[in-house]
Image: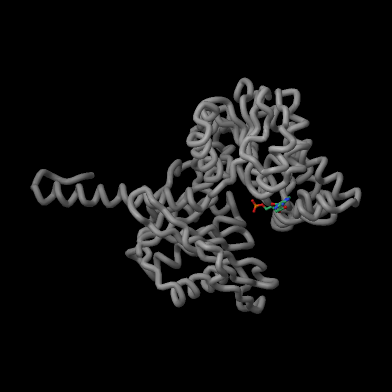
Amino acid sequence: MDTILVDNAGSSSVKFQVFETGGPSRLKRIIKGQVEGIGTRPRLKAQGADGAVLVDETYGPDVVSDVPGAIREAGAWLRTSQKLTLIAVGHRVVHGGPAYSRPTLIDSKVVEKLERYIPLAPLHQPNNLAPIQAFLKNSPGLPQVACFDTAFHRGHSAVADHYAIPEQLYKEGVRRYGFHGLSYEFVAKRMQELFPETAKSRVIVAHLGSGASMCALADGRSVESTMGFTALDGLPMGTRPGQIDPGVVLYLMSEKGMSAEAIQKFLYNDCGLKGLSGISNDMRVLETGDEPGAKLAIDYFVYRISLYAGMLAAALGGLDAFVFTAGIGENSAGIRARIAKKLGWLGAELDANANAGGKPVISRPQSRLKLFVIPTDEELMIAEHTLAVIAADRLQKTGYRETAKSGAGSHA
Ligand code: AMP
């Protein structure tokens, strides 16, 4: 059975999925797994297509002390227990920099280029590159495809893509990239399948998970994002602050004596819902708590989403639909209701029953702004891209051989 492995290595966890390929456009998920608690209580867990638990194993913190270690353990389990016939591996790579605007077949030159973007995503990019390098070393003939979180936003206009800083820095790559692109691409595609008329209009998609951002879509294409140069900007997240005056960073340096490394750790790990509430980065915990910190953090989260909805609506010149996705967006009816209320001035009228029942359309029929819940699936998007890239590559190689055999010259 031919399969594609998808891996999604984050800053502190590793997710992986295996898809069976049944033809050029048919993909069936057969394994879904993850390693969590890396460095503290590492746990490898995977389930089959029917939900049956295939493995549930814990390790000592020193056995799986970092993300590359987690990748090694997950890889060893897949190799020894699953006997897969891999035809390709698809990787989520957070930063494609200015160079990559579409999924790309990986070779050592691509890796070299992607290594240059490590300073743009210091917590994610090295972990994204670790499994790529391991496969290049151990299975050099296996096709690997990099799918970028930034790629979907690369068509932004110059004003959306720039900061008001000297152009030289833009040329060096200091740009407003935007992230969560694989999630937005998947949701845009689902919109096209489920609600084709709305998909052609002006839509905001809110990816509200541990990481959170919003994207403005015009006719299914990204025109603006709340995230910028790094995945720190925009909405408040589980542990990241979202938009913050750069003066705060200067204050931390000059008055608190914090190093660049300490500030980085602070901004990625200690802020957002966790920092503001002083309780947790998990929305479930905050929603069930009655402490003032929990209330403030949720109020701030909802308020900032409503502010950014105004900004993105301005980028689109109006708004026809608002879509919720990712962990909080898909699962918290309470947060959706609070955001919908704030979007009243844009014409949102929530259908409370549909919202509580987790329906895909949660606005009332007469609502001027349509409200949707569309679950995202970044791994399926990566598997689809991977299959398409290797199919195109095979076609090119077959075409090359046929042309060469016929003596009609060669391709560049
Ligand atoms: P993600 O990064 O998309 O996996 O989303 C993870 C976040 O979703 C977690 O931090 C939780 O706070 C949130 N989440 C998941 N399920 C729920 C739920 N039922 N209610 C509220 N928040 C949830």
Total marks shown come to 0
Quarter of the image that includes the N terminus: bottom left
Q: Is 55 left or right of 362, judged from the image as shown?
A: left
Does 66 sit above or below residue 88?
Answer: below
Quarter of the image that includes the C terminus: top left
Judging depth in this view, the residue of 111 and 164 nearest the camera is 111
Residue plotted at (65% across, 37% down): 226
Residue plotted at (83% across, 53% down): 288
Name the quadrant containing residue 371: top right
Q: Is 284 left or right of 362, judged from the image as shown?
A: right
Q: Is 381 left or right of 407, judged from the image as shown?
A: right
Does 4 sit above or below residue 404?
Answer: below
Judging depth in this view, the residue of 65 and 359 nearest the camera is 359
Q: Quick one: which residue is furthest to the top in this view?
A: 317
Question: Does any portion of residue 165 appear in the rendered image?
Answer: no
Residue 95 position in % (x across, y down): 53, 48
Q: Quick one: which residue is furthest to the left in this view?
A: 407
Judging depth in this view, the residue of 385 and 82 nearest the camera is 82
Question: Does any portion of residue 6 appear in the rendered image?
Answer: yes
Residue 200 position in % (x across, y down): 51, 26
Residue 119 position in % (x across, y down): 58, 52
